[in-house]
Image (spheres, rainbow, N blue to C red):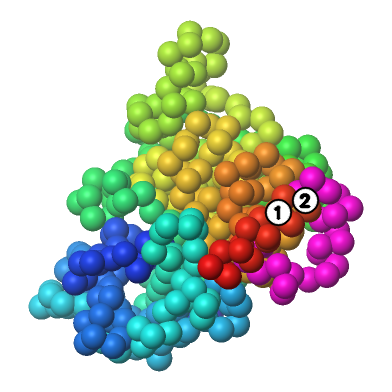
Amino acid sequence: MASLVYSHEWLISNFLKVEAQSVDSPSFKLGPHAWKLQLYPSQDKTHLSVYLRSVEPKAPRAVNFKFVLRNWQDPKDDFKSADASYTYTDACVAGYGFPSFIPREKLSIASGFLRPTSPTNGGALLLRIELEYNTLPAASSAAADGSSGGDGGGGVYPATVCDGAVSAGSGDIATDLLSLWKRPGPTSDLIIIATAPAGAAAAVAANPTAEVLGTGAGAAATIKPTTATAAADGGGSSCGPSNTGMRRFDVHRAIVAARCPYFATLFDSGMRDSSARELPLPDTDPAALEPLLHFMYGGGLTVTTRQQARSSLELADRLLLPKVAALLRTHLLSTVTVASVVQEVLWAADAAQTELLTGLLDFAAEAEADLPERDLQQLAAQQPALMAQLFTAARRAAKRSCT
């Protein structure tokens, strides 16, 4: 089995306006351990410095990692550090990384390493950590066969996004709750039965060795081969993926009610389903629901493909989870590429993702000259109004670049 590479992305939306000597990311989890990124905008006056810090000094952790700085104009020009190997121990206080990661003079909108998100901000910088443990954590083997992003877009999958308020740095509560979700035993008092939409279930039935990962509105289902390990650590699941696109999740009524307004409202409604032991959720992709439940328990979620991120975003809107939706929108927008942005625009329009659509159109406008001609023709044919919006946004971007 190939070694599993975890990744986490940190978006600094106003980099040029940062005045502090150093900036720390929110804590996040990669596999079983918690980490933090630390950035010094100009530690030696001429270079950007980046470090990886452990925030839970327990057993030694031997890791290999590298940093990747996103080039918004062309991901092929992403700036990558050398590979680093380090063993974090109880004695570790400072992080380990690169004091001269990239020259400050290269960090500009013109170079592509900063991206304007408004006429007045200081430029957005996206830093990614890619990490692998020298010994694969057993608890994370379920994701070992996750897709590396073959469904378009950018970034590395599995990708983890976290809620800064309920993160790995919040103590042991999130870890304990996640353990409760993965091994609920007799403590569970509710079974959520998620059944994929009819089209997705038919796709699975036609290919019984596959798992439907997403069925975004108007989009074909993405099929991912099912593995034994994927079902083994699904988290709170009393049965693995099935040929009918149905899955059962053992959960705790109090936790999902506290973390999700949809369930809280349902349980307070007095309707028949409000007190039932089993709660059916029809037209719900199980693979989209799983990371949302993970968030409710632990404050973070991991998506194994871009299509799963899309499906989870749509379901987060439906379940009234604005914080999750915001995290997923940020992830999708911060990892979009020039080659995929038009397809992302078409999906966002079809899925009524207005806020994400605005950001995607702005990105496309900045990169208009490099957009594939075939994709532009498709956009003009399918969404002429969006083509007009893109043209208007491109004119505004051109004016900004001239001033």
**Where 365 falls versus 246 (above or below)?**
below
Give the CA distance from mark 1 to mark 2: 6 Å
Q: Where is residue 2 in the image (x, y as percent from the top left)?
A: 53, 80
Front one among 341 and 186:
341
Name which residue lies at 83% across and 70% down. Answer: 373
Q: Around disc 1, counting alpha carbons within 10 Å, would you say few (fewer than 14), some (14 to 19), or many (20 or more)?
A: some
Front one among 201 and 183:
201
Name which residue lies at 46% across and 19% down. Answer: 265
Q: What stretch is highlighted in magenta?
A: 364-386
Location of residue 95 (image quadrant): bottom left
Pointers 1 and 2 in contact (CB under 8 A)?
yes
Residue 255 on the magenta segment: no
**Where 177 falls versus 129 (above or below)?**
above
Numbered tag placed on residue 212 in the rendering: none
Q: Which amino acid does label 2 sit on?
A: Ala
Q: Name the residue under label 2.
A: 388
